[in-house]
Amino acid sequence: MNNLYKELKPTLIIVGIICLVTILLQFYYTGSITGNNLGKSLLYNVYYGVPLSLVNGYFFDYLNKYVAWEVYPKRRALLGVVGSIFVTMLTLLILNLILWVYIRGLSYSVLWNMENRDFYIIALVITIIVSVTIHAIGFFQEIQKERKVSQLLREEKMASELSALRNQVDPHFLFNSFNVLSGLIDEDTEKAQDFLTGLSKIYRYVLEQRNDNTSSVKDELEFAQKYLNLQQMRFENCIEINTEIGYDSLKKKIPSLSLQLLLENAIKHNGFSEAMPLKISIKEEGNVLIVSNNIQKRSNIETSAGLGLQNISDRYALLKEGKIVIDATDHEFTVKLPLI
């Protein structure tokens, strides 16, 4: 019963539209509408329109159930067109048989006379045009649907991978900060306390960026400065930083915590003192942020997980916003970050 109601509703709409078109055509060609002609026309439209619409509706439902668009789109389109033509012509033949032979009492030969053969040819052409059009639209809609689903899956996969990369940074940041804290505890407990207080404040930024793939250059610079201030509690005047960033570039973005990772790498892999400080430069050039530092290799480099540069590179790859460029000489290490 529910299926009948489901098919009957669009059927009545289609038949209603056909009837309206018939009335308008009759008025256009004759200039008037007579009750007798109008009644016959409406009766024929209902007699042919309702069964044909219902039969095709049930046929399409059957195909959708057993030959789904999303699984077999080409097969569904081909079977839909051929099957629709077949059931339409068969239904027309049955309707004509009922009307002309059983109701009007004419002989079976009337079904095949020249006038009715023209009727079948016209009906066949109309059916082919309508069926092909409907299935072309359906095929196009299915392709668009598949593209949307595919795009959604790609976005979900990218979001998942970016989340995993961000989750790498959090424990990495804490691990290295605790290493610094451990060194301060042995050297100066009061500084260690100040360091721990500062660490808790700047880690709030890390937590705030947990759900953001990118941050503005302005925010990243401010965080980088806080991070360096924290490091200078241990290294005092051994680290110098110089920034040259235009106002417009401050509004642009880079992957969150990128600058902190680069600064961390520079501190970890280089030796420095007040006499030979670590000099870090952050500047813009075109649409690129350039982060460089002088190289003063340490003899006892800490064990590195190799997370920093690879993490940044992977996030740029997922965001599809260009590639980082790494340039290392005997005297300087440079990383170029595309601005987003």
Image (spheres, helix red, strand yellow):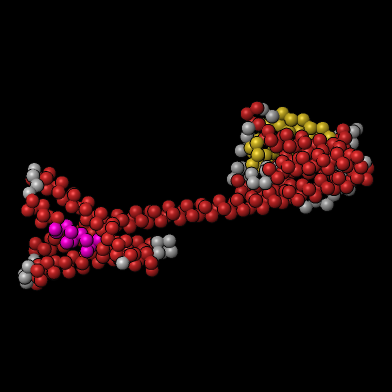
In the image, residue 238 lies at what x, y percent? 87, 35
Depth check, front residue: 261 or 223: 223
Which quarter of the rendered picture does the C terminus lie within? top right
248 shown above or below 320: above
Residue pushed farthest right? 187
Quarter of the rendering containing residue 225? top right
In the image, residue 151 lies at what x, y percent? 51, 52
Q: Main secondary structure of the magenta part?
A: helix
Left or right: 180 in relation to 222: right
Q: Is residue 48 one of those drawn in magenta?
A: yes
Which quarter of the rendered picture does the N terminus lie within? bottom left
User: For the point 49% across and 55% down, which residue is it?
Assistant: 149
User: For the point 18% across and 59% down, which residue is it?
Assistant: 46
226 shown above or below 62: above
Left or right: 20 in relation to 158: left
Q: Give the range drawn in magenta.
A: 43-53
Left or right: 278 in relation to 170: right
User: For the point 81% across and 35% down, which residue is it?
Assistant: 229
